[in-house]
Image: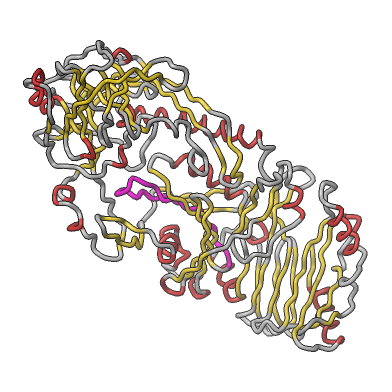
Amino acid sequence: MRTHGTAIIGKNRPARFTAAAAIVALAAIAVSCVNLPPSADGLQDLVREACYEVVILRTEREGIVYERDLPWEALPFNVRNDQYISIGTAFAIAPDRFLTASHVLSPEGYSWVDNDYFIRGADGAVHRVGKVLAFDTARDYALFTVEDFRSPASFEVSRDFEKGQRVIQVGNIYGQGIVAVPGTLLEEFPEERDGRWSYIKTSPPNDKGSSGGPLLDERGRVIGIIDMKDDSFSYSLKMAEVDLQGMSAGVIEDRSRYGFVLMPEVQSPISYIDATVPLPATVREIREAYRDIYAEAYVRDMEALFRSAGGLHPFADGSDFSLYTSTSSPGVQVVFRDDTDGEWKISDLKKAKASGYGGVTTNSAVIDSFTFVDLRVPAADWGRSGGVMSSSETVMDALLSGIARYRHMGGDKVRILSFGAPFVDDTHTDAYGRVWNVAVWTVDFSYELALLLWTPTPSGAACIFLVEDDMSMDWALYDMKRVADLTYIPYAASLEHWLGFLSANGELYGDLGAMSLELDDEGLKVEAPSFSLNLPREAFDISEDAYFALPFWFRVEPDGSLAWKLRKIEFSQADEEAYFTSYLVRKPADSLSRTYLRSWQSISSGSSPYNRVPIAKEDRRDIAVLHPSFDPERGEGFTIYVSVSGTPTDEELYAKISALESGIVLK
């Protein structure tokens, strides 16, 4: 991934003027020329007629629901009445030829919100950008036409300049209109990769929204295209580097480092993408072509990153510990690579709890940009028409009821209650055969995407939630699906929840897909492909409020295939007076500490506490045995452990443990 805990190449270089920061816009451009030299006679008219704002539509997608009416009055009059957002500057070099910075048009990113660009003149008239005739993302320029429009004036181009000369920097600063600011040309500044060209360095620095504006000499000729800045200086591409005739193919250069959220300190070497896109073409066509190029490169480079780190769990070096151990957490956890020793370990996410509508609760933890959520719903919600678990839309609504997302307007903010229907609503089967629902929403007003992977659990849903910019869907979904492979899904809830869960979800996976659970006068009966449980009421107090859990775990089968296998069976009475666990113990790998081997030897030989001898504790009495199917030669087997509060007799403990020895059948 390019942003999650990962530095982007160029981070310490002068910053390009970013379009996203220029959210304010004017309905018309006000031209201001401050202290222009006398030789610039007529320059103000030229700037007014040959310079343009680059704008995009302000989109308001129907379907987003807010807690209250949006406070449009909190925005300046001109902003709330402008249907466009100003993002940069462009200028004419001929009646039918316009220049801007390449990053203003962003040809290297396909937007799921909007891919149409416009220019707006001093008269307020808006015209759609037509064909791109030339562009180079490294040099950062784009030459384009405009549909059904010819500029009334244009700039002369000059390749001549000298150190110390006076210049005029023209740009749509902060979207407030075209401003011409005098400055001084200081020197040429080399391109950072290998010095293939140089920028013109000037002072003072221009500000956001100036990207793509012309750098003029005192005669009003264009000598450069304003490209980027730092705290003290502006940097413009000199016109000698600009192809003014048009190109057969535009040039895209991309340099990135990659990282992965669950391998926080692992980074790839610098990765280069050098690609071309046939021209002339619209911005949308260029973006569609590059989307395929980048998607292929991203997967290639991420796979190389994983290989460089020894692979991903469970095949990676350092996976033995996490495969040997497990968790009984009632909530979502992840397997991650510990930077201190390179071992893959189980997380212990500390989650924030919040109450939502209708008895819904969310327990969430954030790792980098990812939010992991346990969505818990009332048992009665299972199977209810239009209930929380009925669709991706309703699941997201439930998340938003507990995890606040806001739209900021002026100094005010309004909570979002619903994103409406997703534009992507699909499923994904992960490496272990577990089925996730995949949904993506556009958050148009902020040019973002909300992405959600979720899978039903007896208590509600296990969710992975991410918000990214509108151009990031492909790689964000790739990352989320990789994260899903490393996510522990809990199956733990009341028996009432289990009954609703199994009846309402007809297409579950693995053991869950063929599982039946029945609660009757005799007790609890569970049938699944890998086990069955017959728990009589004589042994335990069984009610719909009783707790039942089936922790599964990651496993590599002898043939190398991956499996999501039962690791434990847990039951606790509603009053918590008695509980049992049946746990799969495995012989540790040779790579693990001798301590684990000694533990295995003790357990597999039936040593205490697995010797059927009651144990007295402070306020309880326990008893444990090896399941009758336990075979040390197989290198694994289930144990049974019973705990009862108070002072039950030995006979009562023997009765419970005997009921489980016969009632748990492992297939």
Residue 94 in sight = no
Q: Does the magenta stretch include residue 113?
A: no
Kindly indicate the quadrant of the structure image that contains residue 125.
top left
Quarter residue 623 falls in:
bottom right
Which x, y percent locates residue 299?
55, 34
Q: Nearer the viewer, residue 138 or 424?
A: 138
Residue 249 in the image: x percent, y percent? Answer: 37, 17
Rendered view: 449 above or below 189: below
Tell me residue 345's x, y (percent): 69, 52
What's the residue at 65%, 50% (across, down)? 432
User: Does 166 appear above or below 427?
Assistant: above
* Vertical position of residue 112 compared to residue 139: above or below: below
Q: Main secondary structure of the magenta part?
A: strand
Q: What stretch is highlighted in magenta?
A: 439-458
Q: Is residue 576 left or right of residue 139?
A: right
Is 440 colored magenta in this rendering? yes
Q: Is residue 169 left or right of residue 316?
A: left
In percent of width and height, residue 32 lies at 12, 33
